[in-house]
Image (tube, helix red, strand yellow):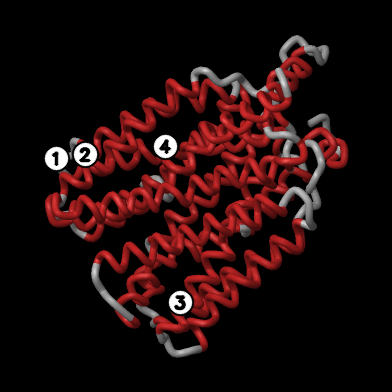
């Protein structure tokens, strides 16, 4: 295989694996957009709405799915999980497409959340293990671009189909189900991760009658616990901001400008598009070549400043626009991208997906619990809540900056040697 052909194959694998992010974010935004329609159609009470939010693809169900899927991924291979998981996702999504009452919505959302969670560690591990050594950050960035693209497509579809009401929501969910089925067939042509195959063979030939295959207890060493604590802490506090930030967009739109649905979708889509540009022009271009600690720190400072603007200054149109710009650009090369990259680098191959699943579960389950307190937080007032979110971002930034690894340009094998394990 020529280098050009190998390069195209690498990018194809990355895109097929990274579409899990498109489906993840698309599911979250689609559910949020359809929620008002479900409340009206099925007379959902506040408790049931909270249950859907807590156990959907943005929270507890995704955490459980990641915990189970990540472990299975290390035991049986990336390909089996990320291929057949999409069929499970499509099954869950069909419950939402054909939902006729509240319990079908809850069931569908929970199944979708499980599938989304299971696919994340499989796809992230595969991308890191199959990317060229000097382009791991660039390939990871593609998955994050797809994470931002999902909400843009879903928002625009909801805007175009809004006259159809609940039927429009069913069409949006159907497009996600169809994509999942298509991905099942496209991914069937992909190869298993060579690094996983080699690591499994090395484990099996290690001399014991029953190979350890990356045992659970091997994950809970002092070194790996420290890595998981660092990554989970950095990502959790950033997600506490992200999980509450949905309160701000509607408030900004009500306060400073046009309140139409079209304007709301336009501003949100612009934010996602700015984030995609930031991923491409900053994270994908620089993360493999420059000091990752400084790059992460710059992102954290940008977001803290952007959030602090709302806490310090009156909410005028210029302040709102600067806030949206800084937050979108800062997110693009910040915690989300680096969590995917670092969580793929800081653990040996046969524990990589397990560790990602554990950390993703901790963060998403914590988010689900935290979601019950969001109404109380929003009741504290706009500026008070803004300062709380500045605090979340500052804590995430400090954790990330202080304990960030310096892995730019290194192969996974080189990182393993420096870490002191067999990779």
- 278 above or below 128? below
Mark 3 or mark 1: which comes first in sequence?
1
Percent position of residue 37, x then y: 18, 54
Q: Are marks 2 and 1 in contact (CB under 8 Å)?
A: yes
Mark 2 or mark 3: which comes first in sequence?
2
Percent position of residue 240, x then y: 50, 63
Q: Which mark is residue 104?
A: 2
Tag 1 secondary structure: loop
- Residue 388 is left or right of residue 179, and the answer is right
Task: Give the Cα distance between marks 2 and 3.
Answer: 39 Å
Q: Nearer the viewer, mark 3 or mark 4?
A: 3
Q: Which residue is mark 4?
A: 114
Q: Are marks 3 and 1 in contact (CB under 8 Å)?
A: no
- Residue 386 is left or right of residue 101, and the answer is right
Mark 3 or mark 4: which comes first in sequence?
4
Percent position of residue 193, x then y: 65, 24
Q: Residue at x 37, y 45 (%)?
A: 27
- Residue 5 is left or right of residue 156, and the answer is right
Q: Quadrant of the C terminus?
A: top right
Q: Which mark is residue 360?
A: none
Tag 3 secondary structure: helix
Q: Quadrant of the N terminus?
A: top right
Q: Which residue is mark 1?
A: 100
Residue 201: image quadrant is top right
Q: Nearer the viewer, mark 3 or mark 1?
A: 3
Q: Which residue is mark 3?
A: 321
- 357 above or below 40? above
């Amino acid at each position: 295989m020529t280098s050009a052909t190998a390069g195209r194959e690498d990018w194809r694998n990355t895109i097929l694996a990274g579409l899990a992010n498109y489906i993840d974010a698309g599911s979250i935004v689609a559910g949020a957009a359809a929620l008002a329609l479900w409340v009206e159609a099925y007379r959902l009470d506040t408790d049931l709405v909270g249950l859907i939010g807590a156990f959907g693809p943005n929270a507890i169900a995704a955490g459980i799915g990641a915990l189970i899927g990540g472990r299975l991924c290390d035991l049986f291979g990336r390909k089996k999980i990320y291929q057949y998981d999409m069929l499970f996702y499509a099954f869950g999504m069909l419950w939402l497409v054909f939902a006729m009452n509240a319990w079908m919505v809850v069931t569908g959302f929970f199944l979708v959340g499980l599938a989304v969670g299971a696919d994340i560690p499989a796809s992230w591990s595969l991308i890191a293990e199959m990317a060229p050594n000097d382009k791991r950050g660039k390939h990871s960035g593609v998955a994050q671009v797809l994470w931002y693209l999902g909400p843009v497509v879903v928002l625009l579809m909801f805007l175009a189909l809004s006259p159809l009401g609940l039927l429009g929501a069913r069409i949006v969910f159907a497009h996600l189900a169809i994509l999942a089925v298509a991905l099942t067939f496209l991914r069937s042509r992909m190869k298993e991760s060579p690094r996983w195959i080699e690591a499994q063979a090395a484990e099996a030939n290690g001399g014991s009658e029953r190979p350890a295959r990356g045992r659970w207890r091997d994950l809970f060493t002092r070194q790996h616990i420290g890595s998981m604590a660092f990554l989970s802490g950095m990502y959790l506090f950033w997600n506490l901001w992200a999980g509450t930030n949905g309160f701000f967009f509607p408030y900004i739109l009500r306060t400073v400008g046009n309140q139409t649905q079209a304007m709301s979708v336009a501003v949100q889509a612009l934010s996602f598009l700015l984030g995609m540009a930031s991923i491409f022009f900053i994270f994908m271009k620089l993360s493999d070549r420059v000091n990752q600690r400084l790059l992460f720190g710059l992102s954290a400072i940008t977001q803290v400043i952007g959030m602090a603007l709302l806490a310090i200054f009156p909410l005028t149109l210029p302040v709102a626009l600067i806030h949206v710009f800084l937050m979108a650009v800062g997110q693009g090369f910040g915690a989300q991208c680096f969590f995917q990259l670092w969580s793929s680098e800081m653990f040996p191959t046969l524990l990589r997906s397990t560790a990602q699943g554990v950390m993703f579960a901790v963060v998403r389950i914590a988010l689900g619990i935290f979601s019950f307190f969001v109404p109380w937080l929003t009741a504290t007032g706009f500026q008070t809540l803004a300062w709380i979110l500045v605090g979340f971002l500052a804590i995430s930034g400090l954790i990330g900056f202080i304990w960030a690894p310096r892995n730019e340009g290194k192969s996974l094998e080189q990182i393993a040697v420096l870490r002191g394990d067999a990779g």
